[in-house]
Image (tube, rainbow, N blue to C red):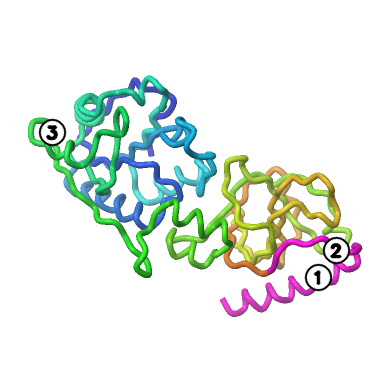
Amino acid sequence: MEMIQGTTDFQLYTESAVAIGKFDGVHIGHRRLLEEIIEQKKNGMQACVFTFDPAPAVLFGLSDGKELTEKPVKREIFALMGVDVLIEFPLTLETAAMAPEVFVSEILADRMQAGFIAAGADISFGAGGAGDMELLREMSGNLGFQVKLVEKVCADGVEVSSSYIRRQVEQGNMELVERLLGAPYLVAGTVVHGNRVGRTLGFPTVNLLPAENKLLPPNGVYYSKVYYRGRYYPSISNVGCKPTVTKEGTVGVESYLYDFDSDIYGQEIKVELLSFLRPEQRFADVEALKKQLQEDIAAGEQYHRKQ
């Protein structure tokens, strides 16, 4: 997948099928949109995703910037789905002030060679977010591209959106989040050294520090899977600051992997949080913590056996 980032000066030379959006989480609604542009590859077009970096809500201070999906993971999803070109267009006060008509004619039609544009009814672009589906349709005839309205996807009668999924993550409803995303909710990162308390207790773990803008579920223990070097390992993971053994207050993700005892410090892993087990808590002493860990590990074995 070709990736264009950090520049407003680019040019594509192949006719493109384009999807525009934030794609936070790349949920089942986003996947439906992406399927439309990937289908156009049969007609000789390249599948292109156009997204703003940062998102408009972040630029204008309307969002805390917490993301469902880390940028490297999002890129990987696009590539695996078959996207040919990803454009992360720098959003500044200057580029945000671009007239919607100029965006359509100069960016979509000219620079991206758009022959097909898939979008939802709530699409907005250009100064003040004034560009919409109606404008795309008005300009499509003269500029020679086709516009496809992609209806919203609903789950249990509720419209699937990033904001709805965000609320479910914040409540720890990980099974529902997986349904809405079409994949388990994951935290990606590099394994870092922990305080090695788990190893001294006989339960070696791997630790990672999530990106600062990563949206995390409530602190607690989760049934999980860890992806490392092409393989999934059943695991249980603690999201939180481990109050029994540290006073730092730094939130991390610590995972115990079944049938695994390798030192993978410095390696990249992905932790999929599958289901909430219990809240994080402070124990009276290390022995009480050890007893609870034994119970958690046994519960995890039973969970994964059923899965």
Circle 2 packing at 10 Å, graded few (<14), some (14-19), many (20+), is some
Q: Dot 1 corresponds to which residue?
A: 292
Q: Is residue 140 magenta?
A: no
State which region is magenta: 278-307
State if disc 3 and disc 1 touch (CB < 8 Å).
no
Q: Secondary structure at mark 2?
A: loop
Q: Is residue 289 magenta?
A: yes
Q: Position of residue 233 (x, y in %)?
A: 63, 63
Q: Is residue 155 left or right of residue 218?
A: left
Which is nearer the N-term, disc 1 or disc 3? 3
Q: Position of residue 194 (x, y in %)?
A: 79, 48
**Residue at (74, 76) in percent of width and height:** 298
Cα distance between the residues tagged 1 and 2: 9 Å
Q: Is residue 107 left or right of residue 217?
A: left
Q: Is residue 34 left or right of residue 281?
A: left
Q: Amino acid at mark 3?
A: Met
Q: Secondary structure at mark 3?
A: helix
Q: In the rendered view, tell whether residue 238 sits above or below residue 295.
A: above
Q: Amino acid at mark 2?
A: Phe
Query: What mark, if any, has residue 139 been given in the picture?
Result: 3
Q: Secondary structure at mark 1?
A: helix
Q: Amino acid at mark 1?
A: Gln
**Residue at (58, 59) in percent of width and height:** 272
Q: In the rendered view, tell whether residue 216 sits above or below residue 63.
A: below
State if disc 2 and disc 1 touch (CB < 8 Å).
yes
